[in-house]
Image (cartoon, rainbow, N blue to C red):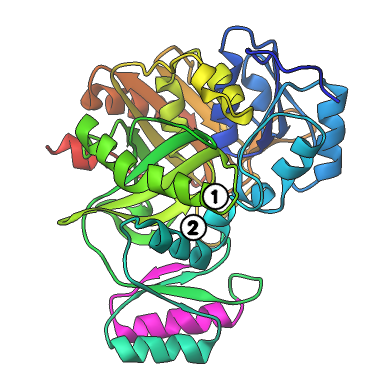
Amino acid sequence: MPSASPALPARILVVGGGGRENALGWALARCPGVEQVWVAPGNGGTLELSGCSQLAIAESDHAALLNACREHRIELVVVGPEAPLAAGLADRLRAEGFPVFGPGADGAQLEASKQWAKALMQEAGVPTAGYWPASSEAEALAALEAQNKPLVVKADGLAAGKGVTVAETVDEAREAIREIFAGRFGGEASLVLEERTFGPEVSVFALSDGQRLVLLPPAQDHKRIGEGDTGPNTGGMGAYAPAPLLDAAGLEQVRHLVLEPTLNALRARGIDYRGVIYAGLMLTESGPSVIEFNCRFGDPECETLMPLLGPELAAVLLACAEGRLDQAPALTINPGSSACVIAAAQGYPGEIRKGDAINSQLEPSDTLQLFHAGTRRDEGGTCLTNGGRVLAVVAQADNFDTAFERAYAGLEQVSFEGITFRRDIGHQVRSR
């Protein structure tokens, strides 16, 4: 059992191996009072982060993660990905007395089940598109035929950022339904059909202790692989924050219309939600509408946001984990703009090439970061590509133009065979 948890966690475990966890490790290790951050399983860039160590433990190995918490006397666990949260990792660690930032399996249903999340939104009066749940192909096709117009088709469960088709035609929606029930996205097939809504998208993140919320600056992701927002959806090719689509008044509107009612509805169901509530929003003509909820930090929004967050971050996450956010120090938000560009592998988001050596001359600074995502080290210590999104180059400045100039200049110092990236990340704000 851990000792009584201090107000400042000295020993932190971050669970996950992507760019999000690389950024979280970097940010938490910089907080005063933090002595060591372990990242499990981490990636090829983990050991490049000052104050971070790597544990070769899969995020799905709950028993080994629990043993690591005991061995290293962990005072705060931050769970990055959605899959271990949905599988109950936070519940298991909390049952052994470890403070965890991340919801239990009950709260993780916000992301793990589209049907559950839509029903919760309806119950809470949260603005979202009309929907039709379906548990069989025949039921889904009948709902589509009854509407007789293109709909959004979403696989019900976790689909690793995939499983969503914004259909342009009824035939396209019909084919997406058939793919889901053919088992393309694994698991027991069920889905949600949604009305299409229109407007710019923005992501809002709230840190919750189950009773209270702290909102972070809004961010905007770029999902399409191609410039001009063309081609297939990806997990995200870049992002920027704070997104000017939402000013302070707009953010408070989201708090009032979306986040507080959602937290209240979770509490009404007996769910003590301690972690991130990620609201993916569409800003329609009639106001913000929830596209989806996630139960963790977005990626690459996390890489974009972490450099904007102040040194109180570790204390605030611990306070959320312990249900005492009212006692936490105020989280400082650094002024200025943050820009992130993703370097992906050739073939992404389809079949990708792996195992290419990464060459980097980039020297990180207070305003320029290189976060690793899909990377690994070979036996000789060479860093190799090992995933779809390989690296995130992030930069900060007083304005977006300068921030993106710094990010792209940093990207020029990084290379690997087949490197793929968009040259127009931030075009929405850069063309204003």
| Residue located beneath label 1 in the image | 388
Where is residue 366 shown, x and y percent of the image?
43, 12
Q: Residues within 10 Å of mark 1 (few under 14, many from 20)?
A: many
Q: Amino acid at mark 1?
A: Gly
For the N terminus, which image quadrant?
A: top right
Q: Which mark is residue 232?
A: none
Where is residue 88 shown, x and y percent of the image?
72, 49
Residue visible at 15% across and 56% down in the picture = 285
Mark 2–mark 1 contact, CB under 8 Å? yes
Residue furthest to the left in view is 432
Answer with mark 2 or mark 1, whichever residue precedes in sequence.
Answer: 2
Q: Nearer the viewer, residue 54 or 362?
A: 54
Where is residue 6 shown, x and y percent of the image?
69, 13
For the C terminus, which image quadrant?
A: top left
Q: Is residue 262 above or below residue 74?
A: below
Residue visible at 29% across and 79% down in the picture = 150
Q: Nearer the viewer, residue 172 or 148?
A: 148
Q: Is residue 253 left or right of residue 362?
A: left
Q: Give the extent of the magenta segment.
A: 163-183
- Residue 187 highlighted magenta (yes or no): no
Q: Which mark is residue 349?
A: 2
